[in-house]
Amino acid sequence: MMLFLYPSKKELKTCVGEYLKYEETSMFGPEYKATGSITGANRPHLTGMGREFFANVVMRDNRIVSVN
């Protein structure tokens, strides 16, 4: 699961239309998709910021389209 580098899900939702700030965690290859759906989380004990949350982010042409 990817790490989203945002302090809260609310902050991530305000970034619709922008590039995604993330960190890859999989040792089996990249999880990032320029167009498609990505599931990830913020884990404060790993990122050192904000609250723990999980989100599904829809991407189109390397830009955030929606956050659920």
Image (tube, rainbow, N blue to C red):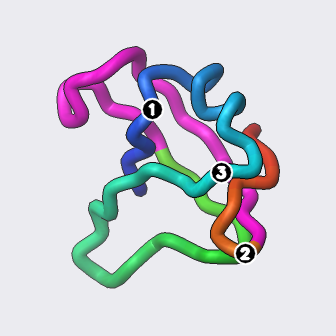
- Sequence-first disc among 1 and 2: 1
Residue picked out by circle 1: 6
Residue picked out by circle 2: 61
Residue 9, position as x, y percentages in the image: 59, 26
**Residue located 45% across and 32% down the image:** 6
Q: Is residue 20 above or below residue 53?
A: below
Task: Determine if the magenta segment contains residue 53.
Answer: yes
In terms of secondary structure, where does tag 1 sit?
A: loop
Q: Are marks 3 and 1 in contact (CB under 8 Å)?
A: no
Q: Amino acid at mark 3?
A: Glu
Residue picked out by circle 3: 18
**Residue located 74% across and 43% down the image:** 16
The stretch of residues the image draws in magenta is: 41-60
Mark 3 and mark 2: Cα distance apart in space:
10 Å
Q: Amino acid at mark 2?
A: Asp
Q: Are marks 1 and 2 in contact (CB under 8 Å)?
A: no
Q: How many residues crowd around disc 3 within 10 Å: few (fewer than 14), some, or many (20 or more)?
A: few
In terms of secondary structure, where does tag 3 sit?
A: loop
Residue 61, position as x, y percentages in the image: 72, 75
- Viewed as shown, does residue 64 lie left or right of 42? right
Q: Quadrant of residue 5?
A: top left
In terms of secondary structure, where does tag 2 sit?
A: loop
